[in-house]
Image: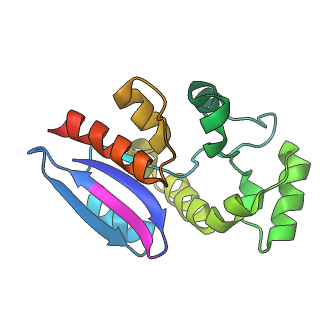
């Protein structure tokens, strides 16, 4: 079984694909309930940073590579991952200061708003060796680039972008 995960207001949005090529959609309030359900999966891809920067690492190679692939117009959708101490800070100001001190970059409000999801994922993959082996970070725009062989033309938030991505999914999974 293969799993794709993204954060949503209700918790975690999950699409699973079983060995019979049947899709299932589900929502979980927390990542531990999700893991309890899908821990036997072959691969779990999640749109959340894993392997947070710190120490001598201020830029993750995966982020730099993704931005390079997507180019100057689309590369900005790959935001810089926060350092671990910032992820565990109690408020934005403290998190922002820690991030600046440790990796030399401020923390955007966009990143701050998903810190609870990053923290939840970080706890799971650092505390559970099996989860660490199965759960992998993934970025949707890199997945679409890989399937299409090119960067998407339209933003995912536009009608054209939705059509473009659905067309690619249909061509791959029909």
Quadrant in which residue 71 is drawn: top right
Going 44% across and 58% down the picture, which residue do you hit?
6
Front residue of 155 and 111: 155
Please state if 8 lies on the left or on the right of 55 as rendered. Answer: left
Is 42 a magenta residue?
no
Q: Where is residue 2 in the image (x, y as percent from the top left)?
A: 26, 46
Going 72% across and 54% down the picture, which residue do you hit?
84
Front residue of 126 and 24: 24
Give the magenta part as a residue range.
Answer: 10-15
Q: Quadrant of the C terminus?
A: top left
> What is the tally of numbered marks visible in this picture?
0
Q: In the rendered view, would you say 7 is above or below 81? A: below
Q: Is the magenta stretch mostly helix, strand or loop?
A: strand
Front residue of 24 and 118: 24
Front residue of 109 and 89: 109
Q: Position of residue 83 (x, y in %)?
A: 74, 50
């Amino acid at each position: 079984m293969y799993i794709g995960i993204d954060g949503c207001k209700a918790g975690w949005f999950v699409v699973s694909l079983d060995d019979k090529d049947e899709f299932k959609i589900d929502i979980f309030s927390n990542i531990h309930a999700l893991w309890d359900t899908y821990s036997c999966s072959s691969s779990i891809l999640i749109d959340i940073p894993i392997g947070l920067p710190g120490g001598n690492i201020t830029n993750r190679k995966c982020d730099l590579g993704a931005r390079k692939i997507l180019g100057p117009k689309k590369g900005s959708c790959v935001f810089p991952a926060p350092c671990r101490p910032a992820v565990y800070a109690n408020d934005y100001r403290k998190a922002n200061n820690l991030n600046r001190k440790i990796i030399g970059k401020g923390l955007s409000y966009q990143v701050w708003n998903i810190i609870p999801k990053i923290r939840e994922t970080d706890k799971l993959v650092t505390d559970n060796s099996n989860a660490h082996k199965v759960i992998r970070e993934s970025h949707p725009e890199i997945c679409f680039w890989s399937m299409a062989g090119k960067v998407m033309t339209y933003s995912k938030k536009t009608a054209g972008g939705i059509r473009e991505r659905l067309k690619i999914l249909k061509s791959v999974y029909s």
